[in-house]
Image: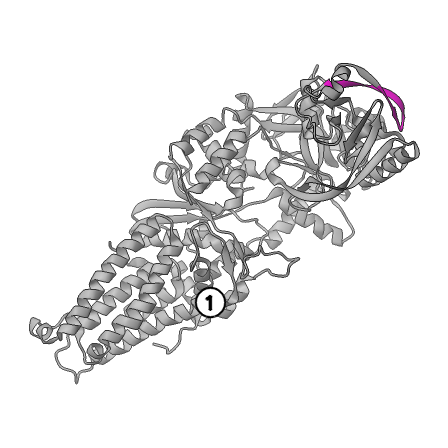
Amino acid sequence: MDPKFTPSLVEETIYKSWEEKGLLSPGTGRSYTILMPPPNANASLHAGHGMYSVEDILIRYKRLRGYASLWIPGLDHAGFETQYVYEKHLAKQGKSRFDFARQTLYENIHQFVKENSGLIYEQFKRLGFLADWRRSIFTLDEHVLERVFRTFAKMEKEGYVYKDEYIVNYCTHCGTSLSELETVHIERKDPLYYLKYGPFVLATVRPETKFGDTAVAVHPKDKRYKKWIGKEIEVEGLLGRFRIKVIADEMVDMKFGTGVVKITPAHDPNDFEAGKRHNLEIKRVINIDGRLNELAGPYAGLKVKQAREKVVEDLKKKGLIEKIDTNYTHAVTVCYKCGRDLEPTVIPNWFIKVRDLKKPVIKAVEEEKIKFFPKRFKKQILQWLNVMHDWPISRQIAWGIRIPVWYHVTGNEQKIWVSFINKKGQFFKLDSIKQHLNKGYTLNEIKQGLQQVTVPVYKQEQVEHIVSLKEPNDSSNWIQETDTFDTWFSSGQWPLVTLKEKEYETRFPTDVMGTLQDILPFWVSRMIMFSLYIKKEIPFKYVCLWSLVADAKGQKMSKSKGNVVNPIDLINKFGADAFRGSLFFGLSQGGKVNLGEDKVMAMRNFANKIWNVGRFIYLNQEASTDPVNPGQIKKQGQFKSVSTDSVNESSKKTESVIEEIRKEFRKEKKQYVKLMDSFKFSQAFGLLYEFVWHRFADYYIEQLKEDMRSGNIEVLGELKNVYFENLKMLHPFIPFVTEAVWKVFHGERSSILNSELRI
């Protein structure tokens, strides 16, 4: 046995042996199933991915307990995020998504993903993950598309799907709407402008939206303005004088500004709701490209911030600004991906009605048919579900699963708007199909170069549409929706697409869903919702929310901060066991992982300690089988106790220590199983660390060292038993060193995974 454990010399060989022996597959026994949260297909390993080790720990632990544990991996096409990465790639070449027809852009991104995907699986193997890679699912696999289509078709038929022109958070840079979960709220200081509005003065941070104002609102209990409620006022504006109605609405904060607010239903969520209550006109003055439109007169074509500056300048010239508060701090909604301000805007969007769909989810959580660890997340998901609004599932991007809706063109050429690129590469902006046909283009040419289809929701006369996975037979008369499904719509059906059909009888519901805490409402709630809707069953029995991995000081890792830790660098330097151990040692359940090199080094030292203890036992075992030492019995590599006479010759001190280690070991194993079954992995690992290092190595071996050297087989056998059982318990956390030691004692063809951890 080598004097030192060197991870780089054994990790690759050990992992290959697991693959060759088929140990990544479940084998026989009682079913135990975990579905891997699919990382982005083009992603590479970062520190946060290290927490996937939680699922590997469970898979290995259950395998040692005799279960047929199966870990099914997968990759997510990650629509918005992947297209964002690809657009940055295009920008470096001086191009943008608007240079390509939709289908061409999709195919280019697909090729980009193929060239950059798969790396993370190889990196997961470096971590020792016992996943059945042959079972890998990609969220754009044919059977996944089929499942997503069937779900959408069923929901549409049953009235859970609708299309409406509703206000959404729109990122004009990324070119898509975002759900409320994909937004970030930041505190920021912006000028607050006090504008003269007829007899009123009102405050706003967005004077550029005044061209879309359709009312002025006051609180119904505000005595200052009671006489104006229901009347029209005349306002001098930048485009001439206009009349506007004064409404009363409780959404008005009497303490904000002067207690009077302008209502712009098309560009503010609160104003939109007020507009619905008071039947106000919706006037959209900012297009989805982030520029003001023709309703803004001479300001048309300006981007929002440019328009704001110009509008303020002109309002000052006309004496229509009373004052400006330059120290106003407020919450601003920004895109979680690019960080730019989101533009609330009204666009056609597909929605899921969630009121009835979420009721069985709430019931299942309340009745603990699904249990959450840490337990506090039960309350969190219930809070989210109770306020959950209808879910906008449209994304205005090319990369993703296209919504399978086809619009009937014949007779609707004026109502269906498209943008496209002709054969010469010329871009034609959004306009009605009729206008493009009048310019001499055929519908087939439009479809070939199609970029975007927009079908407004007409109140009086809807555009005929059908839901179909494939193009209708009379394809010349139909054009498909270009919006794609929100990624959470497809990944929310992950439990419904990962198992083989016959496995749903034995492996569904699956056992544990582990994932990051911050996507509990994004993903977990929707997986439960879809599973209860389609299968009438919960998708998993337990949800284990992982900890956030931060730097050594507890700060969130960020490229801008320069504190990002590359796990592969740590693995190359200290070994996979050291990295894995550092994620769990000294961590409170659900707490933050402070990952630093010192901590990883300490775990490397622990791996070395395990090796050195094994080496000490191994060398004494070899000495005990020396032919010159009498009274030793060896059979097929296993030792038997010597006779009762030999036991009686042992000192009372040795007997006392042996009894002590047996008692403490029984207690350790009992505590370990209880902690593991309660998902308290850090405490379980800490228990093993304390016992192996400070009790077993520092105390018991020291107490029994002389007995071992003198060839006492009972002592050797007892220490080996306790050591081997601790190797099994440690194996889920630090698989490589435990497997390496096991092979030394039991032969290269053996594996600790084929042993059993008996309780």
Residue at point 67% right, 32% down? 168
Q: What secondary structure predominates along the stretch shown in magenta?
A: strand
Q: Is residue 207 left or right of residue 556?
A: right
Q: Is residue 217 left or right of residue 234?
A: left
Q: 137 and 712: which one is in front?
A: 712
Quadrant in which residue 684 is drawn: bottom left
Residue 422 lies, in percent from the top left, at 80, 37
Residue 85 lies, in percent from the top left, at 66, 49
Above or below 99: residue 92: below
User: Which quadrant holds the C terminus?
Assistant: bottom left
Viewer can see residue 638: no
Residue at point 71% right, 33% down? 344
Q: 207 and 541: which one is in front?
A: 207
Residue at point 73% right, 44% down? 189
User: Which quadrant holds the N terminus?
Assistant: bottom left
Residue 657 shown in magenta: no
Quadrant in which residue 615 is drawn: bottom left
Residue 523 lies, in percent from the top left, at 52, 39
Seen as rendered, the residue at the extreme front is 223
Q: Which residues are magenta?
A: 234-247
Residue at point 64% right, 44% down? 336
* Kind of residue at badge 1: Gly
Viewer can see residue 236: yes
Q: How many other residues sit within 10 Å of disc 1, few (<14), some (14-19) or many (≥20)? A: many
Q: Which residue is mark 1?
A: 575
Count of numbered labels shown in the rendering: 1
Residue 236 shown in magenta: yes
Find numbered disc 1 in the image and state the secondary structure of the residue it sits on: loop
Above or below 124: residue 538: above
